Amino acid sequence: APIKKFPVQVINLYYLRYLSLKETKVSRVPSYIGQLQHLETLDLKHTYVTELPDEILKLQRLRHLLVYRYEYESYAHFHSKNGFKALEKIGQLQSLQKLCFVEANHGNGSIMIELGKLTKLRRLGVVKLRREDGKSLCSSIENLRNLRALSLLSVEEDEILDLEHLFSPPPLLQRLFLTGRLETLPHWIPNLESLVRVHLKWSRLKCDPLESLQVLPNLVHLELLQVYEGDTLCFK
């Protein structure tokens, strides 16, 4: 719908569980959203919302928080995905199962630590990652044992995604999306036997990634873009 303002009438729907403003022109969520105590899904995909009020933390039943927008220019456009500025205490939303896409380049890195408290997460998306976020992000991911989908995007095309500190990856992970430069393919990927879908973009690896990916027993969909700086990929 071509609406520009959050519909105030919604707040009277006390028992509302699902609210979608997807593909509207809404840019701001008012603080009285905190009155919707039964809300389980807040879908703000492809709106202009980039920040949420602290009152969101009152929504202790919230399971799905989806706030992002794609800027389609071309398939090979790096800055195509915009997320939202995460709340400093987002770890309080203990019921969250889906969270996309949190911007990492705010504050002093405490957001990465907060993510580790969301142990019910099944889907997590983080954008604008910096190299220095790697260690705390990996530490948090190790706590997310229920994770099925993980999407990570670096802040710039040449910024390193540092994922080498992850030693116990989520065992049930099915979908993995990595966008940004990798010094090496993360050592833990071949151990993820449940992986069905892998996207690697702008990795610019020196070594053929297929040597590691070929051992994944359930891989169905593999998408590569500027992933390897060599001349030949060898499918054994």
Image: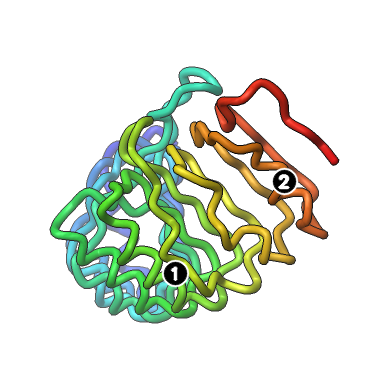
Label 1 is placed on what type of residue? Ile
- Residue farthest toward the left in the current orientation of the protein: 107
| Residue drawn at 52 percent across, 63 percent down | 123
Mark 1 or mark 2, earlier in chain: 1
Q: How many marks?
A: 2
| SS at badge 1 | helix
| SS at badge 2 | helix
Q: Position of residue 210 (x, y in %)?
A: 71, 42
Q: Nearer the viewer, residue 109 or 47?
A: 109
Circle 2 Cα neighbour tier, 10 Å, few/some/many (<14 / 14–19 / ≥20): few
| Residue drawn at 67 percent across, 65 percent down | 192
| Residue drawn at 25 percent across, 77 percent down | 58
Circle 1 Cα neighbour tier, 10 Å, few/some/many (<14 / 14–19 / ≥20): many
Q: Position of residue 136 (x, y in %)?
A: 31, 66
**In the picture shown, does residue 219 fall above or below 32?**
above
Image quarter of the N terminus: top left
- Residue farthest toward the right in the current orientation of the protein: 236
Can residue 195 be seen in this snapshot?
A: yes
Q: Position of residue 56 (x, y in %)?
A: 26, 68
Q: Is residue 37 left or right of residue 189?
A: left
| Residue drawn at 46 percent across, 74 percent down | 142
Q: Nearer the viewer, residue 149 or 234?
A: 234
Front of the two marks 1 and 2: 2
Label 2 is placed on what type of residue? Glu
Can residue 42 be seen in this snapshot?
A: no
CB under 8 Å between discs 1 and 2: no
Residue matched to label 2: 211
Image quarter of the C terminus: top right
Identify the mark at residue 141; answer none if there is no mark: 1
Query: Alpha carbon of mark 1 to alpha carbon of mark 2: how far?
Result: 25 Å
Q: Position of residue 166 (x, y in %)?
A: 46, 67
